[in-house]
């Protein structure tokens, strides 16, 4: 593997072609995974010890991208690095690959949309995410024709997924013919009460389908997360990001994309944990909460009609 290790005072040296990808990893195994991803995409790599990574970023190295590979919690070193990434991520593509238990820690410090967060990603998703990130920044002209890359199929799948999310949101305001339609007037009047048991029964019924059909056939992460957050709101429980990813019943990386989308459109709210600065909670916005409660009220009327 074409890996160069150096301390924080050294330079990248003179290279022909694209600058290397800067890798910070928590173990030799983690570093090797990141190196395979980068070199499979045709990039050189330079490895930086975790305890030197944040300081190195302060000097803005001439890197093609930053890749942070985590397989354990490195303690305060991670907090320092994440703060630096949050501040500097607009300068170069940044990708963080992490196990699910560290997601809350990362999300509490990194909200920059330029950062790609992958959770226990398979090799094809790693390569696809790197290629997409580099293509978006127009750093490497080799990526202009991604149809020739080995990961082209996965790239198209990811693009289709993003398009599907966008299309779902667009249907909130655009009719099937593309013509703009008037949104229905918001329901008014008193918000009906919803029992915790009712919401739990709906969630159990949704999960029961997996006993008889392939669970992916009914994947609907947006609705599953709305239900989970309504249940938590009624029970007065807090929901960390990692728990909401599990409730979405899709791969965690996909769930994170949906959480971001739902937050951007005002359905979810992020709230810092007042007792632990390394964790954030997700909750329904006031508008989403009222909409969910009114929905259950209408469904209850149909059930008793």
Image: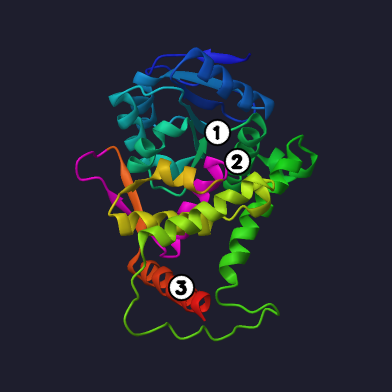
Q: Residue furthest left?
A: 275
Left or right of 143? Residue 170 is left
Q: Residue 277 falls in which quadrant of the image?
A: top left
For the residues labelled 2 and 1, the Cα–Cα distance comes to 8 Å
Q: Which residues are magenta?
A: 250-277
Camera-near label (2 vs 3) is: 3
Q: Nearer the viewer, residue 207 or 166?
A: 207
For the residues labelled 3 and 1, the Cα–Cα distance comes to 48 Å
SS assignment at label 2:
helix
Residue at image x 48%, y 47%?
Answer: 247
Residue at image x 68%, y 77%?
Answer: 176
- Establish if 68 lies above or below 149: above
Q: Is residue 257 magenta?
A: yes
User: What is the crowding at mark 1: few (fewer than 14 residues within 10 Å), some, or many (at least 20)?
Assistant: many
For the residues labelled 2 and 3, the Cα–Cα distance comes to 42 Å
Q: Quadrant of the N terminus?
A: top right
User: What is the crowding at mark 2: few (fewer than 14 residues within 10 Å), some, or many (at least 20)?
Assistant: many
Disc sitting over residue 134 in the figure: 2
Q: In x, y percent, where is residue 169?
A: 56, 67
Examine the rendering and report whether any part of residue 117 can be seen.
yes
User: What is the crowding at mark 3: few (fewer than 14 residues within 10 Å), some, or many (at least 20)?
Assistant: some
* Residue under pointer 1: 64
SS assignment at label 1:
loop
Q: Earlier in the sequence, mark 2 or mark 1?
A: 1
Q: Nearer the viewer, residue 269 or 34?
A: 269
Q: Residue furthest right?
A: 148
Q: In x, y percent, where is residue 4?
A: 53, 14
Q: Residue 165 falls in which quadrant of the image?
A: bottom right
Q: In x, y percent, where is residue 8?
A: 38, 18
Q: Is residue 145 magenta?
A: no
Q: Nearer the viewer, residue 300 or 2?
A: 300
């Amino acid at each position: 593997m074409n890996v160069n290790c150096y301390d924080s005072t050294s330079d990248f040296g003179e290279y022909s072609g694209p600058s290397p990808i800067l890798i910070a990893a928590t173990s030799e195994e983690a570093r090797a995974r990141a190196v395979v991803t980068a070199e499979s995409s045709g990039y050189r790599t330079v490895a930086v010890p975790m305890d030197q990574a944040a300081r190195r970023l302060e000097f803005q190295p001439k890197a093609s991208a930053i890749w942070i590979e985590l397989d354990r919690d490195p303690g305060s070193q991670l907090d320092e690095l994440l703060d630096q990434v949050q501040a500097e991520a607009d300068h170069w593509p940044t990708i963080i690959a992490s196990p699910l238990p560290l997601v809350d820690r990362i999300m509490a410090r990194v909200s920059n949309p330029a950062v790609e967060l992958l959770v226990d990603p398979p090799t094809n998703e790693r390569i696809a995410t790197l290629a997409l990130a580099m293509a978006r920044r127009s750093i490497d002209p080799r990526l202009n024709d991604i149809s020739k890359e080995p990961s082209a199929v996965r790239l198209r799948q990811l693009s289709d997924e993003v398009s599907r999310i966008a299309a779902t949101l667009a249907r909130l305001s655009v009719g099937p013919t593309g013509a703009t339609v008037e949104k229905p007037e918001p329901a008014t009047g008193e918000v009906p009460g919803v029992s915790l048991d009712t919401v739990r029964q709906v969630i159990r019924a949704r999960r029961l389908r997996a006993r008889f059909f392939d669970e992916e056939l009914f994947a609907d992460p947006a609705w599953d997360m709305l239900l989970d957050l309504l249940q938590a709101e009624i029970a007065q429980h807090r929901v960390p990001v990692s728990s909401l990813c599990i409730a979405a019943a899709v791969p965690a990386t996909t769930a994170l994309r949906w959480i971001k989308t739902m937050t951007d459109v005002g359905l979810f709210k992020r709230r810092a944990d007042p007792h632990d600065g390394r964790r954030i909670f997700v909750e329904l916005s006031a508008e989403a909460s009222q909409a969910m409660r009114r929905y259950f009220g209408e469904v209850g009327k149909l059930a008793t009609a």
